[in-house]
Every structure is written in structure tokens, then in C-alpha cells.
């Protein structure tokens, strides 16, 4: 029986095999461009959401992929994942604030990423951001590498990377993550804490490891 993870990973693989993002794949099939975005794969209460059979049928037709081949992509999902692999996408903070590097769920997408090998990076969708400047002292220095996992649960007190809809990106401590307001404490006492309306935030992802 195919799992929730296998089905969605097969959709990701189908898009990749056709040199498409999942949004472009959805558009090619005549679907809403956000139909397969990772933010749509979980409900607000954390329950898993499945793609509709119609949407799967339409992307198979649009790409000429047979059902058997799609099932093969799903079967290859776990077999093709090397648990010992430590290569993750790497991007500088300055670039991360510009458009085209993340989908609406905060997952890496597009081109322009480098690759870095780090033993702590075991999450499937983890990526690395290189610290630039001194604003994150004393915890993170210029040149340090932060491993970010957009799938990790975010809780009050976590160290997180936050991107606003205006393209500002920052590493902070999550003080409050309410339905209307997000409060962030600065790592560097010389920099002010920040408060945002929820609709100003693009995404929040937890820092799971950092080079020191």
C-alpha cells in the first residue's frame, strides 16, 4: 500500500523528471499552481492531506506518464533515499531574501543553490543557509552554516529562520506564534526584537543544527 509520503514524493519526482517545479507541473495539467505545494499537504490541524485522484490523473496525462511508471516513482521514494547522505542545498542569507529560491511553504526550489556536505542533515527537505554579517552574534558568526528543516514542528522558544513577504530574512528566537501576531526575540542584544502581523510572514522554519 502506498503511503502519503510516497504519493507526494512521486509527484515531486514526476515534476523533477520533466524539469518542472511542482507549481509548473500543476499549471501544465490545468490545475491551480498551488495544488501540489508542500503547504497544501497538511491540514491546519496537522492531518495529512492527499492529492485528489483527478489531479493525479491530469498530471499523468499532461506528462505522458503511465500509472505503472508513477507507481514506480512512488516505490523508488524510500529506496532512493540514502539515510547516510549529507548533501543539502546551500544559500547565502542575502540571496535567500530575494525571490525564486523558495516555494510558499518555505521549501527550497529553483536554481542557484550550492551544495554542502554536513553530517547532521538527515531531514529529507533540510537545507543550509550561510550567515552573513554580525547581526546574529553571539550565537552565530559571519560564515557559520545553519541547517534549516521546513518540515520540523515549530514551538515557542525555538531558534528559527523567518522570511517576510517583503523578502526580509532573519534568524530569531520564536517568542510567540499566535493566529494574528508573530513575536521574535533577537539573538543579538544590540538588535531590537521584532513583531509582525501573521499576514506579513511568508514562512517560518526551525534551525535544527549550526556549525560553530
Image: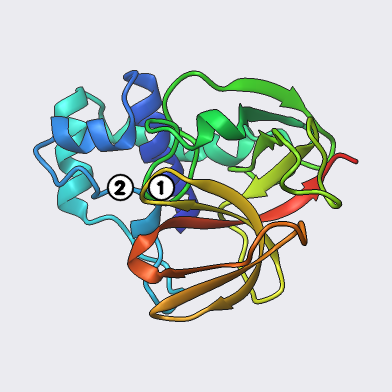
First reached walking from the N terminus: tag 1 or tag 2: 1
- Name the mark nearer the viewer: 1 or 2: 2
Whole-percent x, y for residue 46 in the image: 46, 74
In the rendered view, tell whether residue 44 sits above or below residue 206.
Answer: below
Closer to the camera, 56 or 118?
A: 118
Residue displayed at 15% across by 30% down: 28
Q: Quadrant of residue 19?
A: top left
Residue 30 position, x and y percent, is 9, 38
**Residue at position x 64%, y 28% in the image:** 90
Asked whether residue 31 appears in the rendered view, the answer is yes
Q: Is residue 55 above or below residue 29?
A: below
Question: Could you tell me which quadrant the C terminus lies in?
Answer: top right
Residue farthest toward the front in the current orientation of the protein = 190
For image coordinates 59% across by 49% down, the residue present is 170
Say whether residue 71 is visible: no
Could you tell me which secondary element the residue under label 1 belongs to?
Answer: helix
The coloring applied to the image is rainbow
Which residue has dot 2 on it?
36
Dot 2 crowding, Cα within 10 Å, few <14, some 14–19, many 20+:
many
Residue 148 horizontal/vertical position (percent): 66, 47
Outermost residue on the left side: it is 30
Q: Are marks 1 and 2 in contact (CB under 8 Å)?
A: yes
What is the crowding at mark 1: few (fewer than 14 residues within 10 Å), some, or many (at least 20)?
many
**Image check: 93 left or right of 101?**
right
For the point 86% across and 39% down, the residue is 211
Left or right? Give the position of 159 relative to 112: right
Amino acid at each position: 500500500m502506498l503511503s502519503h509520503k510516497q504519493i507526494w514524493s512521486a509527484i515531486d519526482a514526476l515534476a523533477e523528471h520533466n524539469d518542472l517545479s511542482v507549481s509548473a507541473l500543476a499549471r501544465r495539467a490545468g490545475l491551480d499552481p498551488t495544488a501540489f505545494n508542500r503547504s497544501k499537504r497538511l491540514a491546519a490541524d496537522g492531518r495529512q492531506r492527499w492529492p485528489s485522484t483527478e489531479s493525479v490523473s491530469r498530471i499523468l496525462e499532461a506528462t505522458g506518464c503511465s500509472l505503472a511508471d508513477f507507481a514506480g516513482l512512488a516505490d523508488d521514494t524510500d529506496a532512493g533515499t540514502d539515510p547516510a547522505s549529507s548533501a543539502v542545498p546551500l544559500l547565502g542569507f542575502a540571496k535567500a531574501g530575494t525571490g525564486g529560491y523558495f516555494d510558499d511553504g518555505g521549501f527550497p526550489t529553483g536554481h542557484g543553490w550550492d551544495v554542502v556536505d554536513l553530517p547532521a542533515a538527515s531531514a529529507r527537505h533540510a537545507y543550509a543557509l550561510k550567515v552573513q554579517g554580525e547581526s546574529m552574534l553571539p550565537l552565530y558568526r559571519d560564515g557559520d552554516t545553519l541547517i534549516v528543516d521546513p518540515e520540523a514542528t515549530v514551538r515557542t522558544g525555538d531558534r528559527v529562520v523567518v522570511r517576510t513577504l517583503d523578502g526580509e530574512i532573519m534568524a530569531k528566537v520564536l517568542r510567540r506564534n499566535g493566529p494574528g501576531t508573530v513575536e521574535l526575540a533577537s539573538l543579538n542584544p544590540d538588535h531590537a526584537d521584532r513583531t509582525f502581523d501573521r499576514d506579513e510572514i511568508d514562512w517560518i522554519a526551525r534551525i535544527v543544527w549550526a556549525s560553530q
